[in-house]
């Protein structure tokens, strides 16, 4: 199984997730979400594969989220508009993301990762 690990290297949760992957011998391709942000097409696929609502893809604790007042805008936005906005800046996207062939894990929850991997 080929995995894509999308994260921000300076994020402590991402560092913990990466350490967990390494300690468990999980092979993955690394991608920095800030320098190589997800495209709209990727976000559409990942959203569908995750089975999660789009709101789970937002990095609600991020500076960009607050600066753009996304919380206030979300109720009036369609899913497609949200995905398009997420695609404009990787720092808006919750991380880490672990993308497999038929699944996407959003955020690092060790039990969820153990079960899935």
Image (cartoon, grey):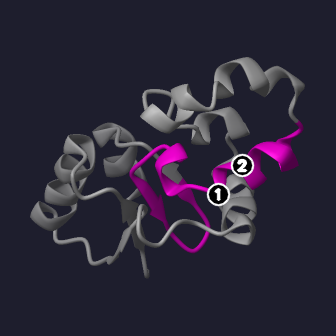
Helix, strand or loop for disc 2 = helix
Residue 30 within the magenta-colored segment of the rendering? no
Residue 114: horizontal and vertical position, in percent? Answer: 31, 49
Q: CA distance from mark 1 to mark 2?
A: 5 Å
- Residue assigned mark 1: 88
Dividing the picture into quadrants, the one containing residue 107 is top left
Residue 39 versus residue 4: which sits nearer the camera?
39
State the extent of the magenta-drawn residues as a range.
Answer: 78-104
| Quarter of the view holding residue 61 | top left
Residue located 72% across and 49% down the image: 85
| Residue lying at 22% horizontally and 62% vertically, measured from the top left | 21
In the drawing, does residue 30 fall left or right of residue 64?
A: left
| Residue shown at the point (49%, 51%) measured from the top left | 105
The residue that disc 2 covers is: 85
Q: Residues within 10 Å of mark 2 (few under 14, many from 20)?
A: some
Contact (CB < 8 A) between labels 1 and 2? yes
Residue 4's image quarter? bottom left
Q: Assess whether residue 79 is covered by the magenta stretch.
A: yes
Q: Against 113, is 87 above or below?
A: below
Identify the residue shown where x is 66% and y is 58%: 87
């Amino acid at each position: 199984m080929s995995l894509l690990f999308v994260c921000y290297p300076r994020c402590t949760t991402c560092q913990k997730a990466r350490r967990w992957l390494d300690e468990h011998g999980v092979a993955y391709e690394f991608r920095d979400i800030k320098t190589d942000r997800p495209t709209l097409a990727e976000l559409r696929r990942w959203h569908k594969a995750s089975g999660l609502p789009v709101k789970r893809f937002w990095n609600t604790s991020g500076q960009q989220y607050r600066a753009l007042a996304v919380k206030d805008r979300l109720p009036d936005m369609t899913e497609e508009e949200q995905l398009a906005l997420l695609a404009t800046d990787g720092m808006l996207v919750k991380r880490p993301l672990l993308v497999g062939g038929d699944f996407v894990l959003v955020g690092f929850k060790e039990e969820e990762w153990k079960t899935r991997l």
